[in-house]
């Protein structure tokens, strides 16, 4: 079992696909991860499983990898009382989670934007470029830069989880370039494929950061480092204050524009009830 703990998870899953299913049951999505060089031991550490879940998970993986053999399992760490769902973020991490909230508000509108988008309409093309501007300025230049230049720099850049996060940012940037190029061609299909692709990458990425990366980082940062992060984030927030307001109100306006229209049947009921306005 010790050797398995030091084996890249993709190798274990390639030899024993059932291990991927077991990890999924514990909310550990290694199968779709494009990096997959994380070691089994790191995965258990990063996901902060309770000692009970960690013991069960290891026993189930051992039964798949070493069927019918008595295997000495590693002792779960007893100081891991909190489960992965009970998350108390430090103030700087909380600020990043709040920024994710604004990005997710935009991502939630993507299906409606694409449904109504007409590449022949000048207004629609301008609005699409405004969306691209929000992604490039708020999500990337403001939020991702805080992560890449400040937060990730507190950790060893060789860590697989950080490589996976950088890779997600780059995949997102490539999709945004794809949206702009397709927009120049007025290629509706291309715009839809890249914008939906971006929304898919970012939604998964944000979930990984909120539920796995940030809590793991919080557990590994000293109080002094958290304080430094807080100060450095504040300096970025101050520099970006005006733009931040602009982009947050852009999302608000978009939400209003794409608010669900009141269904006809409700309108007629209201008319019956209150009388039709003349
Ligand atoms: Fe990120
Ligand atoms: Fe993020």
Image: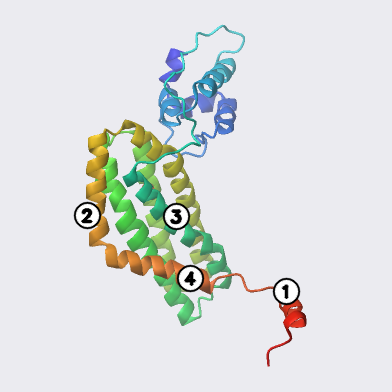
At a point 28% along the width and 67% down the height, the residue shown is 242
The residue singled out by tag 2 in the image is 235
- Mark 2 / mark 4, whichever is N-terminal: 2
Tell me the number on the disc at residue 254. Answer: 4
At a point 74% along the width and 86% down the height, the residue shown is 275
Using residue 190 as the reference point, say whether residue 237 is left or right of it.
left
- Mark 4 / mark 1, whichever is N-terminal: 4
- Does the residue tagged 2 have its C-beta within 8 Å of any atom of ligand 2? no
Nearest the eye: 2 or 193: 2
Q: CA distance from mark 2 to mark 1?
A: 49 Å
- Mark 4 / mark 3, whichever is N-terminal: 3
Q: CA distance from mark 3 to mark 1?
A: 31 Å
The residue singled out by tag 3 in the image is 101
Residue 259: % across, % down: 57, 70
Tell me the number on the disc at residue 266. Answer: 1
Q: CA distance from mark 4 to mark 3?
A: 15 Å
Residue 262, above or below 69: below
């Amino acid at each position: 079992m010790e050797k398995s703990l030091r084996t890249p998870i993709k190798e274990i899953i390639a030899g024993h696909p059932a291990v991927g299913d077991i990890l999924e049951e514990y909310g550990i999505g290694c199968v779709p991860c494009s990096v997959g060089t994380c070691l089994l031991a790191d995965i258990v550490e990063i996901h902060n499983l309770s000692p009970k879940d960690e013991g069960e998970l290891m026993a189930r993986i051992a039964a798949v990898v070493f069927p019918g053999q008595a295997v000495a399992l590693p002792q779960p760490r007893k100081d891991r009382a909190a489960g992965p769902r009970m998350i108390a973020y430090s103030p700087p991490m909380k600020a990043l989670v709040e920024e994710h909230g604004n990005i997710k508000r935009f991502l939630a509108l993507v299906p409606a934007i694409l449904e109504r988008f007409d590449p022949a309409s000048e207004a629609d093309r301008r609005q699409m470029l405004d969306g691209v501007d929000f992604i490039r300025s708020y999500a990337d230049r403001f939020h991702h830069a805080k992560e890449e230049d400040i937060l990730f720099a507190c950790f060893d850049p060789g860590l697989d989880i950080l490589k996976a996060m950088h890779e997600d940012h780059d995949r997102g940037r490539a999709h945004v370039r794809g949206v702009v190029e397709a927009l120049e061609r007025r290629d509706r299909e291309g715009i839809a494929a890249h914008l939906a692709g971006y929304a898919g990458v970012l939604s998964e990425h944000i979930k990984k950061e909120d539920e796995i990366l940030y809590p793991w980082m919080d557990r590994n940062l000293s109080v002094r480092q958290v304080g430094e992060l807080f100060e450095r984030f504040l300096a970025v927030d101050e520099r970006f204050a005006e733009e931040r307001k602009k982009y947050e109100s852009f999302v608000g306006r978009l939400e209003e524009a794409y608010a669900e229209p009141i269904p006809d049947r409700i309108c007629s009921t209201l008319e019956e009830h209150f009388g039709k306005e003349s």
